[in-house]
Amino acid sequence: MGSAGQKPVVQFGQLWYRMKAVVYLLVLLSTTPFCLLFTVSCWLFGRRTRQDQQITEALRQTVLVSGVAHTKGLHLAKTLGKAGHRVIVADTEDFWCSAVQWSHFISKFYTVPNLNSCSGKEDYINGMINVAKAENIDWYIPVSHTKTAVADTIIKQRLAEVNPMIKCLVFDDPKLTTILDNKVLFLKECQELGLQVPYFKEVDSTSEVQEMAKKGLFSKGHYFLKPLMPYSEDRLNFTCIPSSAKEFDKYIACYERKVNSNNPYLIHQFIKGKEFAANAIVVNGCLQVFQVCPCSPMQIDYDVVQHPAIKQWVEEFCKAKQLTGCVCFDFLEDEETREVYCIECNPRLHSAIVSYDMQPDLERAIRGAMDTQFQLEVPVQPSPSSTHVYWLYNEIAKVGLFQQGFGEFMQVLQNGKDAVLDASDPVPFFMLNHFQMPVMLIQAIISGKKWSITNYCLGQLR
């Protein structure tokens, strides 16, 4: 009876997501002629302004960049291509439609096996190594997906066996990558280093939360249950755990079926204040690239700020761990004390890298990370006056969903810059919006999979 009752609900859910995908697809199709005309105009104008190779032939490298379905991967690959490097890009088969392959600054595009199956990890690793061999690369720079961070570290180790001359901008040890990618292990590591993080305790049953309630923890401040699983429905739920017994029992009942050994949560201290993200490219513990940006729940637009306290925290952590690779951190700044608390780390590049707008200084910093003779003493940072960065169709969606008015939308267009649009290379802008994302929507129509938004920053449905 239970499964039979659930089936109509599942079918209705799939129908809803399919219909939503159809609506979004029709919107994109209706705007295609206008976007095509705009892209052609940019291409005709941009050919006159395009400036290719800037570095000398002696500095030119063959670079393999992976994870290019995301705008951050496109941005990094084009930064290197514009500087004069020969850039090869690769991504998993799920992203065969990536807009990056139509960039003027990209030499070749490859797909490698997905990580979904049992053998997927090894297939992915071997696929990337085969590309590296075929193209005789000098540098490997993975712009890791959530699932590929550890595998990308293993690729570095395997490439060292294939050709010790290949230089990789990724962590040396898969164990370190795992620690940085694990919320609990990372926070424990910070505590051991004496770096400030909020109070936390991992729990895998509601009885553990009840024990903490009996000890009176929740009468001493604001604590909430934070899911450890990515993209959980409780990801943005910061409801205070009640201290009164009656309210607590009502609160914890909602988590009885959620919190278990397969889906652990954190009892997490709530810090009231602004949230920031810090993005860094590091070599031997020394920052080569560093930036701070304000955070938003969906992270689909970016500004630049300076924050010395966050920079100091990141420098201390990177030096202590002697990191080499791309890493980003999330911070909270207490609105009363102005102290900063690190709440999370991701062992991969942050999408905020788009704020560099493919400047030559970014290529110089990457070169410093890849070759010690070019290592920088002072990291390259985007100017605080950098233009606000957005994704056009994300902004259009905000208007359609009544999240902003038309006046606000026009102000964003006037004062900001699209993350993908580049007059000297406009085709990826068109292909992201009118090929890559439509393919994702068509796949959703066929599968009926659950999704919330079209995320043009990541180039996928989330």
Image (cartoon, rainbow, N blue to C red):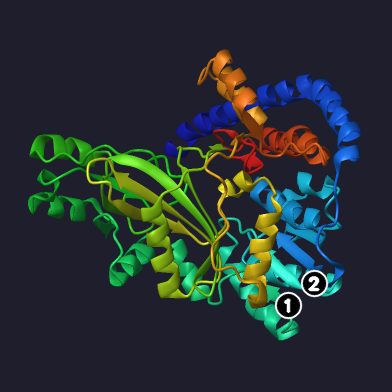
Of 9 and 376, which appears nearest the observer? 376
Point out residue 199 in the picture as x, y percentages from the top left corner. 24, 56
**In this image, 343 relative to 282: left or right?**
left
Give the residue pinned by disc 1: 166
Q: Residue at x 69, y 25 (%)?
A: 22
Q: Secondary structure at mark 2?
A: loop
Q: Tell me which label, 2 or 1, sits earlier in the chain.
A: 2
Taking 408 as reference, is 364 above or below it? below
Point out residue 56 in the picture as x, y percentages from the top left corner. 84, 66
Point out residue 335 in the picture as x, y percentages from the top left corner. 27, 40
Q: Residues within 10 Å of mark 1 (few under 14, many from 20)?
A: some
**In this image, 138 relative to 116: left or right?**
right
Quadrant of the snapshot with the N terminus: top left
State the separation of the CA atoms marked 2 and 1: 7 Å
Taking 31 as reference, is 391 above or below it? below
**In this image, 83 relative to 241: left or right?**
right
Q: Are marks 2 and 1 in contact (CB under 8 Å)?
A: yes
Q: How many marks?
A: 2
Observer able to see residue 67: no
**Residue 137 image label:** 2
Taking 132 as reference, is 230 above or below it? above
Q: Residues within 10 Å of mark 2 (few under 14, many from 20)?
A: many
